[in-house]
Image (tube, rainbow, N blue to C red):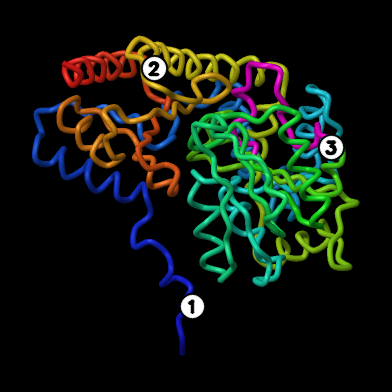
Amino acid sequence: MKINRNFDNLVPNYLFADVAKKTNAYIAAHPDKKVIKLGIGDVTLPLAPVVVEAMKKGAEDLAHKETFKGYPDYEGYGFLRQAISDYYKSFGVAVGADEIFVSDGAKSDCGNIGDIFSKDNIVLVTDPVYPVYVDSNIMAGRKIVYAASNEANGFAALPDENVKADIIYLCSPNNPTGSAYNAEQLKAWVDYALKNDAIILYDSAYEAFITEDLPRSIFAIEGARKCAIEMCSLSKTAGFTGTRCGYTVIPKELERDGHNIYATWYRRQATKFNGVSWPVQCAAAAVFSEEGQKQIKENISYYQENARIIASALDELGIYYTGGKNSPYIWLKCPNNMGSWEFFDLLLNEANVVGTPGEGFGENGAGYFRLTSFGDRENTIEAVERIKKVLTNLSK
């Protein structure tokens, strides 16, 4: 037998595994130190009460013959798909309930969607980039081209008409840079995709963090229904990082190479995915209820205030960054021309604060660093004060 040799082309370790390894080694060597983690984007606030109650009720349903549920529908229960459709409607975007697939999260769908596309397709990603987009296509053996996001374009890359691509990954607000596309910029990508007969895979996992007048869905852009698939997650929106639930939207009219994309993805899901459990789908539906929206917005506001605290400190220090608004991520330029891992070591050893080195997100991440606002408020404030002290001393 033979192994898929495309795995040999992956970097040896996943970025966050390297961060965890270094962090754990430091903690083991310095058990007396309080290390504050602002690295991996995991949430810290508990699930909203209305969500917990819905999950409890869903679990109780499974204890009684009259309300017991077995295998769910491959595309998700109708009540949840309708709730998601109504949510889109709340910010002016028309998405049919019958165009929605419920999943265990956007990460899975971002990685698995490639199953329905030929390995001969050319993939375009913006750089810096969420590693899943790159690694999943390396595993499949696809050619990848990069659109440079950098300080000159505000870390919001735009299409190059001289570059041909078939599959385009976009994330807005972006992970890791925190930048967010405006309508004009997204229209440029939609026009490019239509011209090239390409499909945009649009990751909107952080749309709930948008505070300015920016698109919260690719389907707010004219023409997108003919060239885009949207994936979203409740991980950051509602604290479902451990609960696991997300959704993918595929317009019924989207077709390529003589195939209806919705039907093709349904066929894939029916073969490889048995759906999301009843209690979790009940909990997810509660997220989109009136009370659910009120409660999760309180949590999101908490993280947004953390982001403001971090961004304010960087303003005070005169450090360039993107994000902090419309995003839970702050993407900062390492001071004194330091490398990303060099800055990681400085913060870990001198401030006992963990962030994520930018070069782990791609070539254009070298010399940059990501902090997240998902921490506890007191820890965030303490971490910021430690960082300010270290960087102030560094500039002396």
Side of 151 relative to 237 (left or right):
left
Residue 209: in magenta span: yes
Side of 15 relative to 221 (left or right):
left
Q: Residue at x 90, y 51 (%)?
A: 253
What x and y, as percent, mark residue 187?
78, 36
Q: Nearer the viewer, residue 192 or 78?
A: 192
Q: Nearer the viewer, mark 3 or mark 1?
A: 1
Mark 1 nearby-residue class (10 Å; few <14, some 14–19, many ≥20) = few
Amino acid type indicated by mark 1: Asn
* Residue 379 image-quadrant placement: top left
Contact (CB < 8 A) between labels 3 and 1?
A: no
- Image height of 392 relative to 207, above or below: above
Contact (CB < 8 A) between labels 1 and 2?
A: no
- Predominant secondary structure, magenta span: loop
* Residue 311 image-quadrant placement: top left
* Residue 95 image-quadrant placement: top right
Q: Give the magenta part as a residue range.
A: 204-221
Q: Nearer the viewer, mark 1 or mark 2?
A: 2
Q: Nearer the viewer, mark 3 or mark 2?
A: 2
Side of 310 relative to 27 (left or right):
right
For the C terminus, give its image quadrant.
Answer: top left
Q: Mark 1 vs mark 2: which is more N-terminal?
A: 1
Mark 3 nearby-residue class (10 Å; few <14, some 14–19, many ≥20) = many
- Image height of 205 relative to 70, above or below: above
Look at mark 3 in the image and give the residue it sits on. Answer: 95
Look at mark 2 in the image and give the residue it sits on. Answer: 310
Look at mark 1 in the image and give the residue it sits on. Answer: 4
Amino acid type indicated by mark 3: Val
